Amino acid sequence: MKYDFTTIPNRRNTGSFKWDFSSEKKDAFPFSVADMEWKTAPQIIEAMKDFATKGFFCYSAADEAYRTCVKDFMLRRHNWAIENDWIVCTPGVVAAVNTAVRTFTSEGEGVIIQPPVYYPFANAINNNKRKLIANSLIKTESSYDMDFAGLEELAKDPNNKLMILCSPHNPVGRVWTKEELQTVAEICLRNDVMLVSDEIHFDITRTQHTCLPTLGKEYADNCVVCTAVSKTFNIAGLGTSNIIIPNEQVRTAFASQLATDGYTCINCCSYPATLAAYTQCDDWIDEMNRHVDENFALLGSFLKENLPQIKLFDREGTYLAWLDMSALGMDDISLEKFMIDKCGIIPDPGYWFGEEGKGFTRLDIAVPKEILKKALIELKNQIDNL
Ligand SMILES: Cc1ncc(COP(=O)(O)O)c(C=O)c1O
């Protein structure tokens, strides 16, 4: 092992959203916000140190060197040939999703999402006074499928203009197959529904992820793809993402709304970080994925042996575990309180992800293994005491 994925962090009192703001209970461990409890790659830290010692923290933009390293990464890791000028930088994927909602829809028009799903999608729809249209996922024995017949019906409604796809899916952990993505892309294209494909988790996978535009030019022309170095390398606080838009007209419309929203620069520190991340750190990604896989296996075997009443759903991607805890018979608020106050585990409660997440808990398992083991033992002890 070349990198350190075992040191136990203490990030209290650093302004960390996850550590300092996600719960009042300061001795509980946050398994909540999706950032990792191991440091970013040392190559990125070095690049940022070099940058910091120069002493200029200026207005910055994505130049050709930046764009080329993004382009090369997409080809090398995702078999996706993009052009430098397809990249539009935003201060995060959530910002991009909001901008896309404003670009491609008007007030009162429908935006389709697939709950249970990353809750800022619903916020982007509601806050912009659009109509949330739910095409709920279908729960199977140990995973989730898409409801294509339902999607076709919803897409047919001319008031529904946009779909936000989560690929890989947070929180259910699916890495959608080529066939599934093709079906979604085809339904959207046929019904004149623009597709925003949020692929921020695309490097954290156990099976091959497909970038949506690789399915064909006609689909590429009807989509906006959200990517970022942030999730992969645990540098979300740098606030820069790469939105890749193959079609020129679509890109111009998006960029124009982005300018109206007041965003023109990239965070200057994300410049050296992105260059280092996308040119020097492929082996860090592979090692990070091994640790996430091991943690998921540990979680699965612990639950099977000790807490079979908790159902863990399969995970093909993301570093998030999706647990059905409804067998404990608690309502959502009691379950959340039980997890935090008794077990010392701050979760993302399932109901945040929509009605479909009631009784569920999402745990971020990108943590040193010892932390996970300790939390699981406490979970078992507290459930045994119920
Ligand atoms: C699916 C998904 N999209 C977007 C984000 C956040 O993106 P950003 O920090 O770039 O706004 C997350 C973070 O957890 C996520 O899971």
Image (spheres, helix red, strand yellow):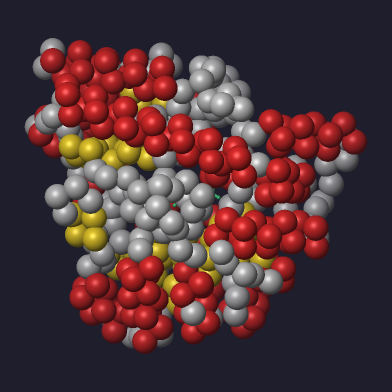
Q: Position of residue 279 (x, y in %)?
A: 71, 48
Q: Is residue 385 visible?
A: yes
From the viewer's perspective, tell me whether residue 374 is left or right of residue 381. Answer: right
Closer to the camera in the image, 149 or 340: 149
Q: Residue furthest front?
A: 1
Point 33% across, 75% down: residue = 183
Q: Is residue 236 visible?
A: no
Q: Position of residue 165 (x, y in %)?
A: 40, 64
Up-down: is 292 above or below 28? Answer: below
Q: Position of residue 139 (x, y in %)?
A: 18, 54
Q: Position of residue 166 (x, y in %)?
A: 40, 58
Q: Residue furthest right?
A: 54
From the viewer's perspective, tell me whether residue 38 is left or right of residue 360. Answer: right
Closer to the camera in the image, 154 or 218: 218
From the viewer's perspective, tell me whether residue 192 is left or right of residue 338. Answer: right
Point 70% across, 43% down: residue = 280
Q: What quarter of the picture does the N terminus occupy? A: top right
Closer to the camera in the image, 375 or 154: 375
Point 49% across, 79% down: residue = 216
From the viewer's perspective, tell me whether residue 376 is left or right of residue 227. Answer: left
